[in-house]
């Protein structure tokens, strides 16, 4: 059973998969082992989508030294205030309900790309396909919490809602 404290720590750590985050950690990648609250987890997969700014990480606990893929957690990173794609997602997708993420530069034609919600679902589909018998839960802070709620609802999975995003690693600057 994964504790609320472990969910919070997993949610905090996913921010560090973002190369734009001040505490970016390139070692947080598939196959790495990380520890939360004296429990070791194996990173099953990570996703960083530079087109829309979405980051996610799937982990499973180590039990007696072996990966327990019967329980998988997908964590979604929240808003990185220095990432204009995260800000655009907060405004356009979460706030306005747009199904496309539009960005523009004063010197280029406007562009649109898939929103973080679609990339988040594609990542969740990939994890579900790799671990079809797992109980999958989602977690996140801020924008990541919004994505976690959305993915959990769409897939009829559990979501850990007991995290305080204001105390997350991603929120502190």
Image (cartoon, helix red, strand yellow):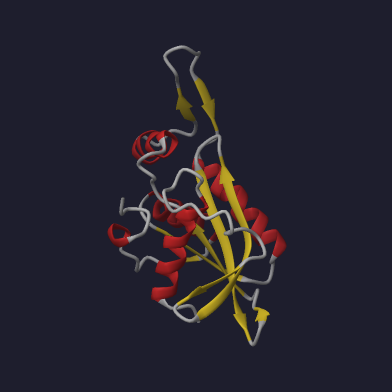
Q: In this image, 103 relative to 125: left or right?
A: left
Q: Position of residue 154 (x, y in %)?
A: 52, 54
Q: Give the residue at the far left of this rendering.
A: 166
- Residue in the picture at 44% in, 73% down: 6
- Residue in the picture at 40% in, 68% down: 8
- Mark count: 0
Q: In this image, 66 relative to 86: left or right?
A: right
- Residue in the picture at 55% in, 77% down: 40
Q: Position of residue 32 (x, y in %)?
A: 63, 66
- Residue in the picture at 45% in, 52% down: 77
Q: Position of residue 149 (x, y in %)?
A: 43, 56
**Camera-nearest residue between 86 and 145:** 86
Q: Position of residue 79 (x, y in %)?
A: 38, 46
Q: Give the residue at the far bottom of this rendering.
A: 64
**Camera-nearest residue between 173 and 9:** 173
**Camera-nearest residue between 62 and 156:** 62
Q: In this image, 152 relative to 145: left or right?
A: right
């Amino acid at each position: 059973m994964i504790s609320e404290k472990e969910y919070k720590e997993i949610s905090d750590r996913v921010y560090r998969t973002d190369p734009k985050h001040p505490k970016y950690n390139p070692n947080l990648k598939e196959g790495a082992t990380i520890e939360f609250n004296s429990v070791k987890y194996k990173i099953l997969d990570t996703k960083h989508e530079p087109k829309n700014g979405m980051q996610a990480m799937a982990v499973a606990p180590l039990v007696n030294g072996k990966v327990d893929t019967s329980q998988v957690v997908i964590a979604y990173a929240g808003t990185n205030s220095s990432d204009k794609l995260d800000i655009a997602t907060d405004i356009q997708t979460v706030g306005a309900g747009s199904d496309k993420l539009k960005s523009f530069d004063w010197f280029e034609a406007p562009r649109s790309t898939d929103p973080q919600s679609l990339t988040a679902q594609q990542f969740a589909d990939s994890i579900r396909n790799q671990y079809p018998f797992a109980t999958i839960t989602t977690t996140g802070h801020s924008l990541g919490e919004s994505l976690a709620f959305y993915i959990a609802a769409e897939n009829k999975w559990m979501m850990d809602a007991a995290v305080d995003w204001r105390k997350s690693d991603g929120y502190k600057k």
